Amino acid sequence: MTGARPALDRESAIAAYLKYADRMPQLAKEDLPGQTQVAHNILEIADQFDVIIFDAFGVLNSGVHAIAGALSAVKALRERDIALAVVTNDASNSPEAIIARHRNRGFDFTVDSLVSSAKYIVPMMSRHSHVTRWGVMAPQHWPIASLPGEAGFLGDDQNFYDTVDGFILIDSDEWNDERQHLLETSLARKPRPILVGNPDICAPMGDFLSVEAGYFAHRAADVCGVIPQCVGKPYSEVFENILQRHPTVDRSRILMVGDTLHTDVLGGLAVGIQTLLVTRGGFLDGYNDLARLYHRSGIHPHFIAPAIGNGLE
């Protein structure tokens, strides 16, 4: 990360999630739990589950640091012999690099336990066989050669935006308002496919919320009418991957843990698993009106806790 990543305040992020909710997985009334149960930490409810899936940013870590108590919580879950997995919309780093960062924080996750949205970018592209030239939002170190067809980084040349057949938005680290204007101007003139490898609106980075690729994709869609096609939470591929690994486990015995309603909780509810929303250290840190947010979004989790390791610090 270069440190140039744009930032967004929480109220603006919530407004964006609500504005674009119709572009995300839709829930039926029966998909929602009857009520939300309050838990002190994840260990209080852990015996109800055989598989627990963690979001990373806002649950395990905020920015570069592990959230207080998270290391102890994960260790205790291991001792109870519960299968653990991590799902991430970080499409800009390799699984090996992501796991290395978690291990540097003290977690014992392995590459096999990680499911990243990056895994589904090329399959998503394959559904657009008519597109032979792609423009890619990603930092210059991203392995663009791994993509099929002809692909180039989106920069400051308007002509390049106008000549590609489709766009892939992966990472906003080197993005800015000027490049967003070039993208929107080009798409307004000629609508083309918009694919998204990280559908997050924002991500907690410690002392700020970074603006992610999903936010810019939805803004671009507003000017051209092309609905973005996304992989990663809250879309089903990352969740189905883990469900397929545990075919004999009933979905009621699988828990998704996250810090946002519109990515983690929505995604878990949409595939029929249990959900836990954490409120400290991530997107909702310091937020005091959850009842109103539940009402505005039409989403609420099965469980809520301050943090997975609350009281274990």
Image (cartoon, helix red, strand yellow):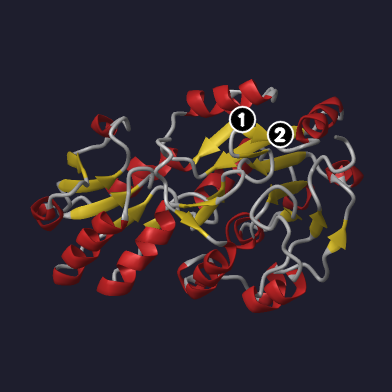
Q: Which residue is mark 1?
A: 113
Look at the image and tell me whether residue 248 can be seen.
Answer: no
Image location of residue 26, percent across then percent down: 55, 70
The numbered dot on residue 188 is none
- Residue drawn at x 71%, y 72% is 294
- In the rendered image, which quarter contains the N terminus? top left
Report whether 211 appears left or right of 63.
left
Report whether 43 appears left or right of 27.
right
Image location of residue 43, percent across then percent down: 88, 41
Question: Badge 1: few (under 14), some or many (20 or more) residues near its Cα, within 10 Å?
Answer: some
- Residue drawn at x 32%, y 53% is 176
Amino acid of disc 2: Leu
Label 1 secondary element: helix
Q: Are marks 2 and 1 in contact (CB under 8 Å)?
A: yes
- Residue drawn at x 19%, y 66% is 185
Q: Which residue is mark 2?
A: 84
Label 2 secondary element: strand
- In the rendered image, which quarter contains the C terminus? top right
Q: Is residue 185 above or below residue 55?
A: below
